[in-house]
Amino acid sequence: MKKQLAALTCILILATQTASAQQFLTLISPKGGEQWSMGFTYPIKWTAFGVDTVKIEYSTSGIGGPWNLITPGVPSNLQAPGSLSDLEEEDEFTRSIIRGRYYWTISWSINDSCHIRVSQKSNPSLYDVKSFIVRPYIGWTVHVSEVDIPLYTVQTKRYAPYFAEYWAGGKHGIVIRTTDIGIHWTVCGILEGDVRTITIGGSEFGPGTAVAGSVMQSGRARISRTTNEGRTWSVVDTTATIWRSIRFVNANKGYAIGDPVSGFWVLKKTTNGGISWIDIQPPLPATAGESGFYNAAAWIDSTRGWFGTSDNAVYRTTDGGSTWTKVFLQPGSSGITAIHFFPNLYGLAGSADGSVYRTTDGGVGWTKYASTLPAAVMGISGLTYPSECWALSGTNIYNSQNSGETWSITQYEGYAGTVQLHHLSLTGEQSAGLGCAVGENGTAIGFYRFLTGVQPQPHTRAEAFELFQNYPNPFNPTTNIEFRIANREFVSLKVFDVLGKEVVTLTNELKEAGTHSVQFEAGNLPSGVYFYRLTTGSFSATRKMLLMK
């Protein structure tokens, strides 16, 4: 709490050099240096104290302007996000800070560097300015994930040339999902523990189905499953202490790998789409002290799979896990932290010391390249052609055009950032590839490549759909929740606790188009943070509220 108040005091001092000491206004999106794409819609977000209305402008000529008007004035608390960035209770001062948001579609005429300025409409001397970069959407582009917690895992799947689904998971059990190639994300799950591995499933799975592995501080782990875009999750396994990787090879068959227990690896499989999981027999013994790494596994079909360990070794199977061969890549203890295999049995492995290895025979033999990456390789992936691949190391994404022998950060094909990244996933073909990398502070960096010359269509936000912040907030014990829908649709409005357990269903019926209000009475609930989620056939949104008794 003292650190939080100190940080807020620092913001106040910096932002009020020319204004009253009782006011501040700080941009939080863009943060500075992001790469946004022309033609797409992004949220401009800010925090404010003692400010009622803000004006928003942009400049392509530097911080000195001239400035072009985006909006002449909007309430400071417009579309207050109520995000899931902070699951612990806040002090009274923090709760009084306004969190505002305004959606802006970047013109196709804007390119190169740009600045956003948000100012108090009645006092232009109170303002904040941040820069970002505008470019065509190709290669790696920073997106806004809508959460500020660390994201540890991501998987992408392309169903059609211009339709893909991405799922990501992170701290506090948060799961987010996007269906517009990473431009906008929706919170679609709050599981117990930290989500460390997630999978969309095999090629026959349709959109909306995912399986996640979460880890609790108590040394327990869970596999959870959803088939309805994350509206509900079922816990399907609780036997492991840590799930390192979960992957599906088709609609029914999948594999889960967990750290050793009593000297044996925890290896499980499912043959019914993740509904139930059984032990793979016979048990696979582990070396004393050996452990795995998150997402450091690969499967190319129902029989052939690999996973890396702290022994600087790769286990491989050619019979669906019934037997395994352990291959040591090089003496040492740095560990194999990332693995990717192509369908032709070419494979790449990255280690904790930045080393990269390649195999051309399905993992029987490995060659270590002379060049290394600057930090642990937390993800390695490719599309369909083995010569081109990508690796995640530290804060950057590196591209290789020679099967991992050398790496570089080049415009569009690579990415240089400042935020620690944790995982990446690519899907599609060499000429039509999509992907995403995730990391700290809710960072989500999308990859897009279509060599046919066809550009993606700009995302149009359905402004007629909206879930508003409850009022009053905090509340005791009654609050009102308003939402707006564009069409006559079946609407579900539910309340969840911080563990993702459903508390009450407020609405579950057909509603006419327009604005609706529902009262939530929480007299029988304890104080704390709760979440309410609105779901229709074409829209889903989640917000946070605080009950204080």
Image (cartoon, grey):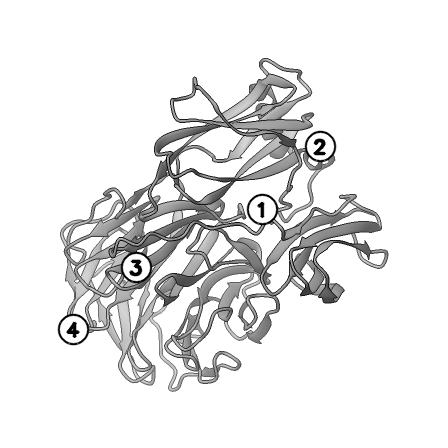
Q: Is residue 336 visible?
A: no
Query: Quick check: 201 above or below 139?
Result: below
Distance Cα–Cα, label 1 vs label 4: 45 Å
Residue at point 39% right, 26% down?
60
Q: Please name the amino acid that badge 4 sits on.
A: Asp
Distance Cα–Cα, label 3 vs label 4: 25 Å
Residue 410 image offset from top left, x and y in percent: 23, 43
Marks 3 and 2, the one that precedes in the sequence? 2
Residue at point 53% right, 45% down?
148
- What residue does disc 1 label? 85
Q: Horizontally, is 408 left or right of 33 in the view? A: left
Nearest to viewer (mark 3 / mark 2): 3
Marks 4 and 2, the one that precedes in the sequence? 2
Marks 1 and 3, the one that precedes in the sequence? 1
- What residue does disc 4 label? 361
Distance Cα–Cα, label 3 vs label 2: 46 Å
- What residue does disc 2 label? 93
Q: The N terminus is located in which quarter?
A: top right
- What residue does disc 3 label? 433
Q: Horizontally, is 500 left or right of 365 in the view? A: right
Marks 3 and 4, the one that precedes in the sequence? 4
Distance Cα–Cα, label 1 vs label 3: 30 Å
